[in-house]
Amino acid sequence: MEPGGVIPQHVAIVMDGNGRWANRRLMPRAAGHKQGVEALIRVVRACVERGIGHLTVFAFSSENWKRPAEEVSGLMSLMLSTVSKHVGRLAEQGVRIRIVGDRSRVSDKVRGAWEEAEQRTVHNSRLVLSVAFNYGGRWDIVQACQRIAAQGVPAQQIDEACLSRHMALAYAPDPDLFIRTGGELRLSNFLLWQAAYAELYFTDCLWPDFDSAELDRALQSFARRDRRFGEVREAALPDQGTAQVEA
Ligand code: FPP
């Protein structure tokens, strides 16, 4: 079913549930992550078709290093194979790939693959796919503050706009819709600054099962939301004029 109504400019997704998807099938967790890549490729196409300009996905968090070494190295290898297998087709669809996160901790090989993917797609603009890898919302705020301090910006010139300009996703509008699959109801340190006014959508669907129909359900939910950004909308004002404060 088509979503109808307002299409978000920027969708952010916490792709959770790969491990459980695999466990339920008595498969290794790595098989869940592999299917997770297939789901991501499906969802990118669906976003392109629906005219969504930015899709940002959480592929590896700052905290994911605590997973067993075998799973971490599996995710690194998956990143490499995903770049070589899928970047060509994504480029044909007009997708620009950007990697956001702390690049200092990944191997030269992974860093090189990212740079290649970014370079190959640099002239595309139909959809910007930002892959958050070794990313954390708190890391992002700290690195922005460090860069501002390193530039010697006077304290009175540091405001929200200044901080936004130094965040990892400075090139993108703030996410309008924040989706989390896998049934958990938390943000898990993803886009803490940028998601201040995002509409939240949680689904029990495990990420490898997520597809265009699931995306449309999220878009339909988004289209029904009344976004006020802290203001009181005209229609919501009571007749006698006592304004209510809305969050
Ligand atoms: C969370 O599921 C998922 C991740 C930590 C990795 C997400 C990665 C992908 C979808 C594929 C990799 C993407 C690229 C671009 C290489 P989980 O393992 O925490 O699942 P669980 O909660 O069921 O255990």
Image (cartoon, rainbow, N blue to C red):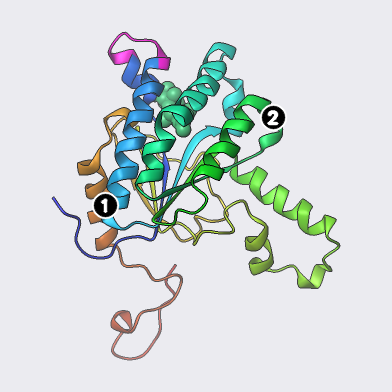
Q: Which residue is mark 2?
A: 105
Amino acid type shown at disc 1: Glu
Question: Left or right: where does residue 91 sit relative to residue 211?
Answer: right
Question: Whole-percent x and y of residue 20?
Answer: 35, 20
Q: Is residue 39 magenta?
A: no
Question: Left or right: where does residue 3 sit relative to residue 91?
Answer: left
Residue depicted at x 29% and y 34%: 204
Query: In the displayed structure, would residue 61 be above or below residue 149?
Result: above
Residue depicted at x 56% and y 14%: 68
Question: Left or right: where does residue 50 sit relative to residue 167?
Answer: left
Q: Where's the C terminus, which quadrant?
A: bottom left
Question: Whole-percent x and y of residue 156?
Answer: 79, 72
Considering every residue shown, the one lying at the far left of the view is: 1
Question: Whole-percent x and y of residue 45?
Answer: 30, 44
Query: In the displayed structure, would residue 19 be above or below residue 147?
Result: above
Tag 1: Cα neighbours inside 10 Å, few (<14), some, or many (≥20)?
few
Q: Secondary structure at mark 2?
A: helix
The image quadrant where one finds ligand 1 is top left
Residue depicted at x 41% and y 23%: 33
Of pointers 1 and 2, the one earlier in the residue sequence:
1
Is residue 133 something that shows in the picture? no
Amino acid type shown at disc 2: Arg
Query: In the displayed structure, would residue 163 be above or below residue 64?
Result: below
Count of numbered badges drawn on the protein: 2
- Which residues lie in the magenta part? 23-30
Q: Which residue is mark 1?
A: 49
Residue depicted at x 46% and y 61%: 197
Question: Whole-percent x and y of residue 168?
Answer: 61, 51
Tag 2: Cα neighbours inside 10 Å, few (<14), some, or many (≥20)?
few
